[in-house]
Image (spheres, rainbow, N blue to C red):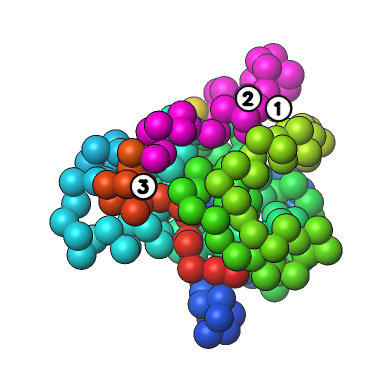
C-alpha cells in the first residue's frame, strides 16, 4: 500500500505513469508497506501463469529479498526507478522516505533492490544516473543504500505514519528505529541467483515494482 498523500500521474509517452506526492512528505515517513491486499506469489506460482499474463507480471511485479513475487494492488506498482531514489527499503516489507519530498515531486525507488533479471536503460536525470540499472548493481550499491536508510530512520518517530496500521510487522520496524534490533542490510534483498534465473527463464517475470520506465 502506497502512502495516501500520493497520486498517479501520466509523465510522458516515454516514461508512462509515475507516482507523485500531493503534499509535502517528510523524511522518515513510511511510503509503502506490504499490506494484506498486496498479492504475493511464490516463484513457481508466478511462473505457472499462462503466457498472456507473463508480460503483466514482468512489468508490474517484483521479486523481494525472500524470493516472493509481489504485485502491488494499488498505484504503488507504478513507482519508477531513480538512481537518486526518494524511498528505500527497511527490511522487505517497508519503504521509507530517505529525504524530504516536496508536494508535486515524484516518488522513486531503487530497482536494483528488487532483483531485476535483465539490465534496464535509465534516463532518470539524477546527477549520479548510472545509465543502466544492472542486475548486480546491489553488490556495489548496498553500503550507500544502508547508510541512507540508517540516516533517515530516526526521523520515523517524529513524523505522521498513516501507513503503520497496515504494516505486517510494525513491531520489528520500531525495534529497528529504536536501535533495539540490528537494521537489516539491503544486501539481503538480493535473492539467490539460481532462484531469480529460474524465474526469469521460465516466465520473464520480475524486474520491479513498475517496470515501464524511466
Ligand atoms: Zn538513473
Q: On screen, 145 above or below 73?
A: above
Instruction: Give the main secondary structure, helix, strand or loop, of the magenta stretch.
Output: helix
- Disc with the residue nearer the chain's start (2 vs 3): 2
Residue closer to the observer: 201 or 188: 201
Q: Residue furthest bottom?
A: 13
Mark 2 or 3, closer to the camera: 3
Asked which secondary structure carries label 3, the reply is helix
Q: Which residue is mark 3?
A: 200
| Residue 18 image position (x, y, % from top left) | 56, 70
State if disc 3 and disc 1 touch (CB < 8 Å). no
Q: Is residue 90 visible?
A: yes
Quadrant containing the C terminus is: bottom right
Q: Which residues are magenta?
A: 170-197
| Residue 184 image position (x, y, % from top left) | 63, 25
Q: Which residue is mark 1?
A: 177
User: Any magenta on residue 192?
Assistant: yes
Question: At 29% from the left edge and 36% from the top edge, which residue is drawn?
Answer: 42
Q: Is residue 153 visible?
A: no
Mark 1 or 3, closer to the camera: 3
Residue closer to the observer: 37 or 18: 18
Question: At 57% from the left edge and 23% from the top edge, which residue is drawn?
Answer: 172
Asked which secondary structure carries label 1, the reply is helix
| Residue 197 image position (x, y, % from top left) | 39, 40
Asked which secondary structure carries label 2, the reply is loop
Q: Is mark 1 within 8 Å of ligand 1?
A: no
| Residue 49 image position (x, y, % from top left) | 19, 52
Q: Which residue is mark 2?
A: 184
**CA–CA distance in space, label 1 to label 3:** 35 Å
Amino acid at each position: 500500500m502506497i502512502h495516501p498523500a500520493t497520486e498517479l500521474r501520466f509523465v510522458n509517452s516515454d516514461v508512462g505513469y509515475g507516482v507523485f506526492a500531493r503534499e509535502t512528505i517528510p523524511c522518515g515517513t513510511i511510503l509503502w508497506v506490504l499490506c494484506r491486499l498486496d498479492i504475493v506469489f511464490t516463484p513457481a506460482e508466478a511462473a505457472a501463469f499462462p503466457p498472456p499474463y507473463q508480460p503483466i507480471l514482468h512489468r508490474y511485479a517484483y521479486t523481494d529479498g525472500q524470493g516472493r513475487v509481489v504485485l502491488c494492488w494499488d498505484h504503488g506498482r507504478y513507482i519508477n526507478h531513480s538512481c537518486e531514489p526518494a524511498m528505500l527499503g527497511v527490511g522487505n516489507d517497508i519503504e521509507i522516505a530517505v529525504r524530504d519530498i516536496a508536494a508535486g515531486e515524484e516518488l522513486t525507488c531503487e530497482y536494483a533492490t528488487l532483483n531485476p533479471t535483465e539490465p534496464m536503460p535509465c534516463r532518470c536525470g539524477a546527477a549520479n544516473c548510472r545509465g543502466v540499472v544492472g542486475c548486480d548493481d546491489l553488490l556495489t550499491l548496498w553500503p550507500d543504500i544502508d547508510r541512507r536508510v540508517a540516516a533517515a530512520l530516526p526521523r520515523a518517530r517524529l513524523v505522521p505514519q498513516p501507513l503503520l496500521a497496515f504494516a505486517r510487522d510494525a513491531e520489528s520496524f520500531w525495534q529497528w528505529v529504536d536501535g533495539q534490533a540490528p537494521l537489516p542490510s539491503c544486501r539481503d534483498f538480493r535473492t539467490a541467483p539460481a532462484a531469480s534465473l529460474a524465474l526469469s527463464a521460465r516466465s520473464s517475470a520480475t524486474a520491479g515494482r513498475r517496470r515501464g520506465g524511466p
